[in-house]
Image (cartoon, grey):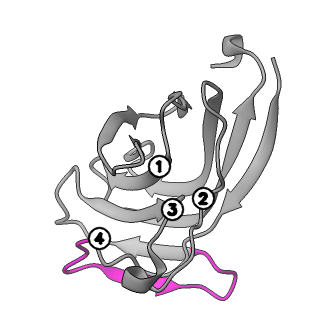
Amino acid sequence: MGSAEIATVRWGALNSQASLYGTALTLEVSGAVRLANRLMPSGTTIQEWYSFTRYQSVRDIPALPLLHSGKTYRIEPAIEASPAGSVIFEVRCFDRFDVLLRADVLHPPSYAFEYPADCHHYTIRLMNGGCDELRFTSFSLLEVDDRGDR
């Protein structure tokens, strides 16, 4: 019923897919990111991380580790959001032809998901769920040992 941390993911480079028009974005010395935008609509992608990239097109390496098929994982964010609980994680799983197999929208407090058997790569999106301001430090990705820990 325990969990084992397999990765700690930080903000990284700004993602070209994120539409942050009108956002005040500050990178702190500690590596944390402070973001403020009271007019950002809910459902907007704030940042996205990848387990697979085509280096020639994005010039960046994957930020996410490889996962095991059929296993359950949990995201533990180190995020301060205003209002509290107003950020959403979306895990998108793709096959080897880049076809979307599954999209799990994870709301607080449970950020658990199962990695599909035929998945080749995945992305994790941090999305606005009514958030005005946030301070993002990192998130931990944990492998859940027992389904009862969900």
- Mark 4 to mark 1 CA distance (whole Å): 17 Å
Observer-nearest of 112 and 51: 51
Where is mark 1, residue-wise? 122
Q: Magenta residues, as a range?
A: 18-32
In magenta segment, residue 30? yes
**Mark closer to the chain start, 2 or 4:** 4
Say what amino acid the circle numbered 4 marks: Ala
Say what amino acid the circle numbered 1 marks: Tyr
- Mark 2 to mark 1 CA distance (whole Å): 8 Å
Where is mark 4, residue-wise? 18
**Mark closer to the chain start, 2 or 1:** 2
- The number of numbered badges drawn on the structure is 4
Q: Position of residue 112 (x, y in %)?
A: 56, 30
Q: Quadrant of the C terminus?
A: top right
**Mark closer to the chain start, 3 or 4:** 4
Where is mark 3, residue-wise? 52
Task: Give the class, few, some or many, for how many residues have Cα within 10 Å of label 1's Cα (few <14, many ≥20).
Answer: many
